[in-house]
Amino acid sequence: MRINNKEFGEWTADDLQVLLSNDAYRENNFIDYKVNFAPLLDKNNKKEKQAEFRNDVCSFANADGGYIFYGIGETSGVASILAGISIPNIDHFELDRRNELQAIRPTVPDVTFSFISLQDDKYIVVLHIQRGLYKPYITEEPEGQFHFYIRHGNKKQAMLSEDIKSFRKERLEEHITEMKKLFALVQLIPATFRSDCVPMYDLYREGKLNFDDLFNGMIYDRAVPNVDGMEQTSLIYFLNDTGN
């Protein structure tokens, strides 16, 4: 995205004035405005706000990428004020945010930070989130509850199971196109994968367990992550207690 004929990373506070009351830069699939950075302000709900931050990033990575502007207020989706957020140390701020993003699965999306100085230690912080290569990106909050979000219009929305399966099929097709030859996907599964520690390998050998049904992205009627976003695997190896 270009602002004032400049690319991301070149923008100044003067350039951002172009956003104000400009319908061409209204919130959409690629743009989101937030007047503050909630995890810094709401100490009583810090974990929930950090989770929301991760979900916002995932929603763009699961779509076509985009930009989140922290420190810009909006009215009906149109930028209305360059408020800025107070940041004593921008290096620490970015490091903390990157640490918070580490909880995203299967890997952290490609995110670039830009700090645009206003005054009095206030900045507009812009996150440029690339369209993810390993989507769907997933968050797990609280433990055992997985969340899939995608940017749609000016909001993020939860993805349906069919969306997740479609993403995995798309990723598999991309692999085939990129590799340009036959390949096998290998998934390593502990013999006691399930929480009740059922000896899965024994059940499989006895014909009592169907892995085609188990590893299709849905377990117990809820979506769960696979190793790299794939739905199917061509080969399955079991690990026993000795690692073999």
Image (cartoon, rainbow, N blue to C red):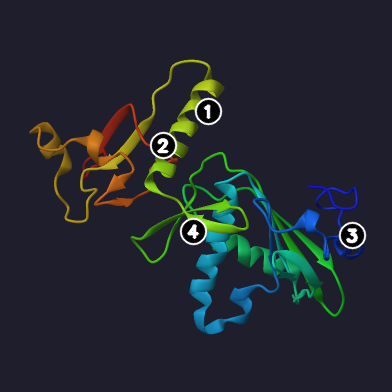
Cβ atoms at labels 3 and 1 below 8 Å apart: no
| Residue to which mark 2 is pinned | 230
What kind of residue is marked 3? Answer: Asp
Q: Is residue 76 left or right of residue 183?
A: right
Q: Is residue 177 above or below residue 145?
A: above
What kind of residue is marked 1? Answer: Glu
Asked whether residue 64 appears in the rendered view, the answer is yes
Q: CA distance from mark 3 to mark 1?
A: 37 Å
Image quarter where the C terminus lies is top left
| Residue to which mark 4 is pinned | 103
Where does residue 183 sit, x and y in percent of width and height? 43, 20
- Residue drawn at (68%, 64%), measured in percent from left and top? 94
| Residue to which mark 3 is pinned | 15
Q: CA distance from mark 2 to mark 4?
A: 19 Å
Q: Residues within 10 Å of mark 1 (few under 14, many from 20)?
A: few
What kind of residue is marked 2? Answer: Met
Q: CA distance from mark 4 to mark 1?
A: 25 Å
Single out the mark in the foreground, 3 or 1.
Answer: 3
| Residue to which mark 1 is pinned | 174
Q: CA distance from mark 2 to mark 3?
A: 41 Å
